[in-house]
């Protein structure tokens, strides 16, 4: 059997996928159980040198619809990104009876309900390994080796840009903006880094993971999202003194009828495995009933890691065509469980106050916290500056987010509190689940 592939978009990931297809052609076909052929490529710019030889590709075009409408294409690979033209291409491919491979997490997180329903109606498949974790085989693991496991918790580092920035701030003692500029110069961050540093990219990925793991549609707007742009070296230092490392963590929990889905800067105990994930690397840690903890780790982005994930999806599509393997996409479009509002989420907190160094300040803050059922685990205070101001760090026991926000409103009304409180959540995770 010949399995013919049409690829739209020759950017970083597209070029990596073509390289992998060409360089590993024999292995790809052997694993697929079919002769996998790159039948066509489409890109607005076919002249630029991307380090790949396209001379053997029969169909080269500037119009993606030429591939979608061709009878000589079995699978369309969408790698242009975005949510407009890409959505039209994916819909068109499915309606023309073709399977789809994509690494477009934004598209699936925002429009997955519509697209997966369309795939089901036309008896087609959408594979999207490259959309989450780059080269980490998380999606195929969830549909394969972990398919029988009831996953209860996900703790994931799934944005390499943010992880690189936090790592360098910690290791080199440099501020956010300086490290961000370096990340852009190295190609780890886009010219507009908003999606990465504000947690939006991680939220897209978490919505997909939670939908698969918990059997319920998760909309992007249901994911509480906060980024790292306001993180300071001071907070990283205080956290380290208390035994924590700071990560942009994507967290999802199945709480027997409700789920939590949130992305935010998080202090993780330094002894835990996730705390040691440095630089541009990603990791997904999951806890499942019976199985316990498992973690997948690797490069989360780049041309060859993500390109390899795309090609593994192409292999899966070819295998599915001969085996007629069914994939249930209904969890992406059937709401089942309620999402717990952030005000009801319970966790521990790091709180950094800037206060006037007057007698009784700490007791006033502690009294307000106690009045909202928030107990203090530890206190860290430094020497006051020349103007008699000093930071006070309080670590709390587990408390409800809503109670904490109410307490902070009262605390900010005190005339001795000189700035907005820095709040960072803490995820200790059970040691057995780390």
Image (cartoon, rainbow, N blue to C red):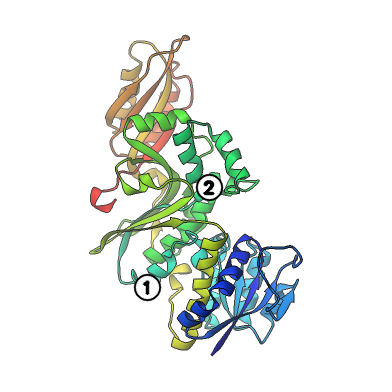
Name the residue carrying label 2.
161
Name the residue carrying label 1.
144
Q: Secondary structure at mark 2?
A: helix
Image coordinates for residue 88, horizontal then vertical, percent? 66, 70
Q: Residue at x 46, y 9 (%)?
A: 386
Q: Residue at x 49, y 44 (%)?
A: 164
Q: Residue at x 68, y 63 (%)?
A: 50
Q: Residue furthest bottom?
A: 1
Res. 227 visible in picture: no
Q: Is 96 situated above or below 19? A: below
Q: Going from the N terminus, do you reach mark 1 or mark 2 first?
A: 1
Res. 230 visible in picture: yes
For residue 340, which numbered disc appears in the image? none
**Front one among 356 and 136:** 136
Q: Is 335 situated above or below 378? A: below
**Front one among 143 and 44:** 44
Q: Quadrant of residue 338?
A: bottom left
Image coordinates for residue 183, horizontal then vertical, percent? 57, 43
Image coordinates for residue 101, horizontal then vertical, percent? 55, 72
Bin the neighbour count of mark 1 within 10 Å (Cα to Cα): few under 14, some 14-19, many 20 and up.
Answer: few
Bin the neighbour count of mark 2 within 10 Å (Cα to Cα): few under 14, some 14-19, many 20 and up.
Answer: many
- Gap in Å between the C-alphas at discs 1 and 2? 29 Å
Image coordinates for residue 113, horizontal then vertical, percent? 52, 68
**Front one among 306 and 365:** 306
Asked whether disc 1 touches disc 2, contact meaning CB atoms under 8 Å apart, the reply is no
Q: Secondary structure at mark 1?
A: loop
């Amino acid at each position: 059997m010949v399995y013919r592939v049409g690829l739209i978009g020759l950017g970083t990931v597209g070029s990596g996928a073509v390289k992998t297809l060409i360089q590993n052609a024999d292995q790809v076909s052997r694993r697929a159980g079919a002769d996998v052929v790159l039948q066509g490529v489409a890109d607005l710019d076919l002249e630029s040198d991307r380090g790949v030889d396209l001379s053997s590709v029969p169909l080269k075009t500037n119009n993606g619809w030429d591939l979608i409408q061709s009878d000589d294409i079995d699978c369309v690979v969408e790698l242009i990104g975005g949510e407009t033209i890409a959505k039209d291409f994916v819909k068109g491919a499915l309606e023309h009876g073709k399977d789809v491979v994509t690494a477009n997490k934004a598209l699936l997180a925002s429009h997955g309900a519509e697209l997966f329903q369309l795939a089901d109606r036309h008896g087609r498949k959408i594979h999207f390994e490259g959309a989450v974790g780059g080269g980490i085989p998380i999606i195929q693991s969830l549909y394969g080796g972990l398919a029988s496991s009831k996953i209860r918790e996900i703790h994931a580092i799934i944005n390499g840009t943010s992880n690189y920035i936090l790592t360098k701030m910690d290791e080199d003692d440099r501020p956010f903006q300086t490290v961000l500029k370096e990340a852009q110069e190295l190609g780890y961050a886009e010219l507009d880094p908003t999606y990465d540093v504000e947690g939006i990219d991680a939220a897209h990925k978490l919505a997909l993971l939670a939908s698969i793991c918990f059997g319920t549609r998760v909309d992007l707007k249901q994911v509480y999202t906060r980024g790292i742009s306001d993180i300071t070296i001071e907070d990283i230092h205080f956290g380290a003194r208390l035994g924590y490392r700071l990560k942009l963590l994507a967290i999802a929990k199945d709480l027997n009828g409700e789920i939590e889905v949130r992305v935010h800067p998080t202090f993780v105990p330094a002894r835990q495995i996730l705390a040691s994930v440095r630089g541009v690397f990603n990791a997904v840690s999951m806890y499942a009933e019976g199985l316990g903890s498992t973690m997948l780790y690797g490069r989360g982005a780049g041309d060859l890691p993500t390109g390899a994930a795309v090609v593994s999806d192409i292999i899966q599509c070819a295998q599915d065509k001969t085996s007629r393997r069914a994939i249930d996409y209904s969890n992406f479009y059937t709401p089942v469980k309620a999402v717990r509002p952030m005000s009801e989420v319970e966790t521990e907190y790091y709180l950094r106050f800037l206060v006037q160094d007057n007698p009784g300040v700490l007791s006033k803050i502690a009294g307000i916290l106690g009045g909202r059922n928030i107990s203090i685990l530890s206190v860290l205070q430094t020497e006051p500056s020349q103007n008699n101001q000093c930071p006070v760090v309080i670590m709390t026991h587990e408390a409800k987010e809503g109670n904490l926000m109410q307490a902070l409103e009262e605390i900010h009304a005190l005339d001795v509190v000189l700035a907005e409180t820095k709040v960072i959540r803490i995820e200790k995770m059970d040691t057995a689940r780390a």
